[in-house]
Amino acid sequence: MTNPPERLLWIDNTEVDSSTRQRFSTVNPATGETLARVAEAEAADVDRAVRSARAAQPGWAALSGVERGRLLARAATAVRGHRDELARLECLDGGKPIAETPEADVDSAADCLEYFAGQAASLQGEYQEVAGGFFYTRPEPLGVCGGIGAWNYPLQIAAWKAAPALAAGNTMVFKPAELTPLSGLRLAEIFAEAGLPAGVFNVIQGAAETGQALTGHPDVDKISLTGEVGTGKAVMRAAADSLKAVTMELGGKSPLIVFDDASLEDAVSGALLGNFYTQGEICTNGTRVYVHEHIMDAFIERVIDRTRQLRVGDPADPATDVGALISPAHRDRVLDFIARGEAEGAERLIGGEPVSVPGCDGGTFISPAVFRVADDRCVIAREEIFGPVMSILPFADEADVIARANNSPYGLAGGVFTADLQRAHRVAAALKAGVVWINHYNLTPIEMPFGGVGQSGIGRENSRRALDHYTQLKSVFVASGGVDAPY
Ligand code: NDP
């Protein structure tokens, strides 16, 4: 048996070892096989990466927006050039179906780089005449930004954070999740290949302690985190010590409301996409599916029928619909939710069983589960499971279902399926959510602001709005006359 390859840190456009030479393993969740031994960054390594980013930042910010944009556009092209390789890496490291990763991971990352390449030259201030002169504003970069990623969309998250930060003239130190360290590092290498200067994008590897060293570093100006609510709170507390700016993309338990005039097939498609894509490991998933009682039986019949046809299998097989959960611990957590849901009276209609996949011994597969839930207080209808578990709940009245949909500390997303135009917009306006889909679910075009309200987050990613979260305004007052001092 050959030893797994070693992957290190990325500082100053060079792959470098950590000071302690400590390693951790990253494994393929579909097989348990070790993919690589990865260098673990200590506080000293984080400091080294931050110093590199700090040293590079003035030069990077001094480039014109057009020049920064040109380099980001080259990076987008390079990412597309490595599409197959990156898609395979996300599949291996994350257990995600290869049927998804080229588009959902690689294209999404490239689209984001391309979009912000175009936006880099568009940063503008304001001008206004006022008593005694005029002022103008300068959108200036924050400086060094720390990015901390979750394991479900590692490449996409790295790009969604890096592209707007870099477009605005910041530099970045990025920490991928310990469970999926490979694509962030590969992205850094591709950035260098595309001509990004040394220090502009550094990657440190490790678990929570490495993230804490980054969050607590006095010379980091901003932290952008994608992770759980609890992690968000810890990171915000740590960031408060040095009053860092924060963007928080956190968890959710989003409602998807299906009225009785909706296209049944579209609504079922939306519910399946919003629960089972990426094995259900998606923050915005519409895991509370509220279905009007008039169409409940027909909806459930179609959901069960189409869920039965989903193929749980080797993520590397293009025919696979549902891959492996990220780790044995996470698989057990999802199964535990399923057991607790049943114990609390939820009716399991299909799925929710461990699945053994030929050729993938040691894989963490479970069949997509659908529950009929009578009580909104049931654990599986309240808590984020982050696995393929759909809860279907009946409703009869619009005002009542909106109140129930909003009865959650989360506020990431929501969906409504209806043929009634006015109702669609009325419900979209009433939902406590950062993103609402009307007659679709989980589409995240890069042009559309993305983020949550309530405990689901602070700030927005994607769209021009993201630039507001990676810049600070300086107001410059210019006097038009002499100084009339009373002293
Ligand atoms: P975690 O919150 O466990 O981890 C997120 C990242 O934070 C990881 O890199 C983790 O390190 C790091 N981290 C953990 N503790 C700390 C700390 N105290 N200080 C600094 N960094 C820390 O989330 P998961 O990776 O388990 O991802 C799943 C969660 O992410 C779900 O709740 C999901 O909803 C949410 N999510 C939100 C999205 C959004 O855009 N709103 C999108 C995708 C996911 P490590 O894991 O390496 O130990």
Image: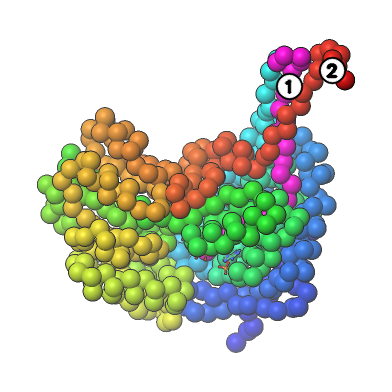
Residue drawn at point x = 78 percent, y = 44 percent: 60
Comparing marks 2 and 1, which lies closer to the viewer?
2
Residue drawn at point x = 72 percent, y = 60 percent: 217
- At mark 2, the secondary structure is loop
Q: Position of residue 315 (x, y in %)?
A: 43, 67
Residue drawn at point x = 17 percent, y = 43 percent: 397
Q: Is residue 24 above or below residue 434?
A: below
Q: Which residue is mark 1?
A: 135
Disc 2 CB within 8 Å of nearest ligand 1 atom: no
Type of the residue with mark 1: Phe
Q: Is residue 64 above or below residue 294?
A: above
Q: Is residue 456 magenta?
A: no
Q: Is residue 134 magenta?
A: yes
Q: Main secondary structure of the magenta part?
A: strand
Please indicate whether residue 193 sits to the left or right of residue 262 in the image.
right
Q: Which residue is mark 2?
A: 486
Q: Quadrant of the N terminus?
A: bottom right
Please indicate whether residue 99 sits to the left or right of residue 269 in the image.
right
Q: Position of residue 9 (x, y in %)?
A: 72, 67
* Residue 351 numbered mark, or none: none
Could you classify mark 2 by the number of other residues whose Cα lies within 10 Å: few (under 14), some (14-19), or many (20 or more)? few
Q: Quadrant of residue 297?
A: bottom left
Residue drawn at point x = 61 percent, y = 63 percent: 176
In space, the residues marked 2 and 1 are separated at their CA atoms by 23 Å
Residues in magenta? 130-152
Q: Quadrant of the C terminus?
A: top right
Q: Position of residue 123 (x, y in %)?
A: 67, 31
- At mark 1, the secondary structure is strand
